[in-house]
Amino acid sequence: MTLGDGIFYSTILLVVTFTTYQLSVHEKWKTIGKGGCIFIAVI
């Protein structure tokens, strides 16, 4: 793993962690579920 890969993967990890925290605080899991179902239906 190069330095650039490490920075990229750590940024992705931080974004996912922050997004999960914000979804938990604002209790928007139902919205994410609906969006996921629509995404799967389109595919």
Image: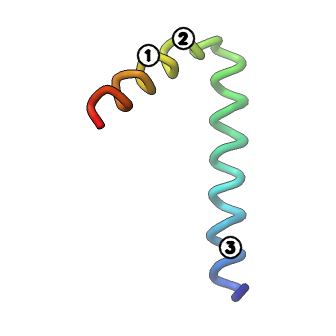
Which residue position is annotated with label 3?
7
Q: Mark 2 or 3, which is nearer the eye? A: 2
Q: Amino acid at mark 3?
A: Ile
Label 1 sits on residue: 34
Colouring rule applied to residues: rainbow
Q: Quadrant of the N terminus?
A: bottom right
For badge 2, the amino acid type reads Lys
User: What is the distance, in whole Å, between disc 1 and disc 3 at their CAs?
Assistant: 32 Å
Question: Residue 37, located in which quarter of the rendered image?
Answer: top left
Going by the image, does 13 lie left or right of 41?
Answer: right
Q: Position of residue 28 (x, y in %)?
A: 57, 14
Alpha-carbon neighbours of circle 2 within 10 Å: few (<14), some, or many (≥20)?
Answer: few
Q: Position of residue 42 (x, y in %)?
A: 27, 31
Task: State the CA–CA distance, disc 2 to disc 3.
Answer: 32 Å
Q: Position of residue 27 (x, y in %)?
A: 64, 11
Upstream in the sequence, badge 1 or badge 3? 3
User: Element at badge 3?
Assistant: helix
Dot 1 lies on which element? helix
Quadrant assignment for the C terminus: top left
**In the rendered structure, are the residues bearing label 1 and label 2 in contact, judged by CB atoms less than 8 Å apart?**
yes
Residue 41, compared with residue 29, is above or below; it is below
